[in-house]
Structures are given as structure tokens and as C-alpha cells.
Image (cartoon, grey):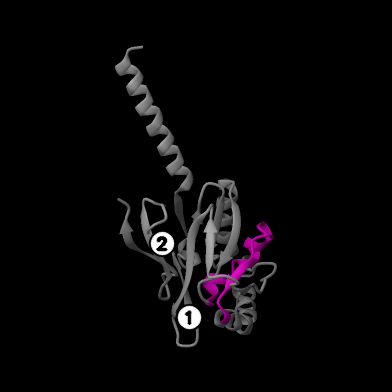
Amino acid sequence: MTKIQRLVFIVLFAALGALTAHAQKTLHLDVYTACEDGWRVDSTVVSGQTEAILIDTQYLKTEATKLADRITASGKKLKAIIVTHPHDEHYLGIGTLHQRFPNGPIYMSSDALEDFKQKSPDALAGMKKYVPAEVPESSPTGEVFPPMHFTVDGQSVELMQGQGDDSKTSNTYIWIPPSERLSPATWYLTASTYGSPTQMSRAAQLG
């Protein structure tokens, strides 16, 4: 091997190492969208190499099951389930997801949790009347966010509060700081208006 060949080999080896290290530190977004019967609800999985958090849990039991299957297939540990705001299409899949991932805590804002406690029994009763096959076996209550900061494989994920779809509750916004590596770009996740539960708008392009 000549000196030039050795130099090329060293450069390529170093580049491969850098790319591997980058891939291990990159966060990914996987958006699952329900079928039309499921109101085309979006759920977003923010994941790293070994860990993930889930944002919103689907409306129908069948769609929540498909979402759970996707997370299971990834082989990643689900650290938490986050409900952005207390509309039933955001939380009725909680029971199905919690059954599959019992160690993943369920978080909401304090006002969302209060609204959930008041309205979720009626939402479940309505489902039992009209679509009984899609009703989850249970609907765990969840808890208020203990921190407003999460990490996914060491990468920061921040929680913020903003105006919700009505004046009584706030939406939870998920902010991934631009300093963190996100593939292919850095995005701002928010619970949006009725009919588009999880909206992603571009915040910054990685250089």
C-alpha cells in the first residue's frame, strides 16, 4: 500500500466513524397518520438510537394498536407518552398504548388533566354506543408533567405551553432545540386546530 493509499484509507475510516457517531446522536421523527375512519389523527414518535417518546395516542383502538406495533418493531424503549391537549382523538388510544407499554408514564398539563378527568368518561361512553369494537379496555388517567425537559438518548426535548383549541385549556408544544441533531431538519411540533392534531412546521435547517 502506497502512502497515498494509506492516507485515503485513513481519511475514509475517519469519515465513516464520524458518520456513525452522528447517526447515533440523531433524533428522528416518525409520524403515524390514521385512516379516514380514524379522523386521520397524527401521532408522532421522537426517537434516538435506543429510546423514544410518543406524542398523542390516536382515536380508534385499531389505529392505536398499529401505532403500538410500529413502536415495538423499532425495538426502542418508550420513555413517555405525551397528550398535547384533552380532545378525545388525542387520548382515547391511551389504554391500548399503556397496555403495550405499561412502564411508559402518561403526561398532560394540569388543566388538560383536569379536563380529561371530567370529559373522558362521556367520550368512552359515546364510543361504546357507536363503535364498541374500537373502545379500549381501560383509559388510564395519567399525570401532570413532572419536568418540562426530557432527554431521548441524551438529546434535549423541551415542553412548552401555549393557547389551546379553546380558552380553558392549553396545548403542549414540543420543542427540539436547534443545537440538537434532528434528521433531516429541526422541527417545531405543536397540537394544532381540530382536524390536524399534530402539525409540524419547519424551524431550522441543519447546516
Where is residue 12? Give x, y as percent. 36, 28
Give the answer, above or below, for where 182 lies relative to 139. Answer: above
Residue, x 52% and y 46% (percent of image)? 49
Q: Which residue is tagged 2?
A: 177
Classify mark 2: helix, strand or loop.
loop
- Check if mark 1's residue and mark 2's residue have beta carbons within 8 Å: no
Using residue 108 as the reference point, say whether residue 163 is left or right of it: left
Q: Which sits earlier in the primary sequence, circle 1 or circle 2?
A: 1
Q: Quadrant of the N terminus?
A: top left
Task: Using a 10 Å C-alpha cutoff, classify the residue at mark 1 as few (fewer than 14 neighbours), some (14 to 19) or many (20 or more).
Answer: many
**Type of the residue with mark 2:** Pro
Residue 110 image offset from top left, x and y in percent: 58, 80
Q: Nearer the viewer, mark 1 or mark 2?
A: 2
Can residue 75 be seen from the camera position used here? yes
Q: Where are the magenta residues, as a range?
A: 86-110
Which residue does the numbered mark 1 point to in the structure image?
170
**Magenta stretch contains residue 93:** yes
The x and y percentages for residue 98 are 66, 63
Asked if residue 92 lies in the magenta stretch, the reply is: yes
Crowd tier of the residue under label 2, counting other residues whose Cα lies within 10 Å: few below 14, some 14–19, many 20 or above? some
Quarter of the image for residue 114 reads bottom right
Q: Residue 68's image quarter?
A: bottom right
The residues tagged by marks 1 and 2 sit, at their Cα atoms, a distance apart of 21 Å
The amino acid marked with disc number 1 is Ser
> Tag 1's secondary structure?
strand
For residue 145, above or below residue 45? below
- Observer-nearest of 8 and 150: 8
Q: Residue furthest top?
A: 1
Expressed as whole percent of the image width and height from the top left, the position of residue 130 reads: 59, 74
Q: Residue furthest bottom?
A: 167
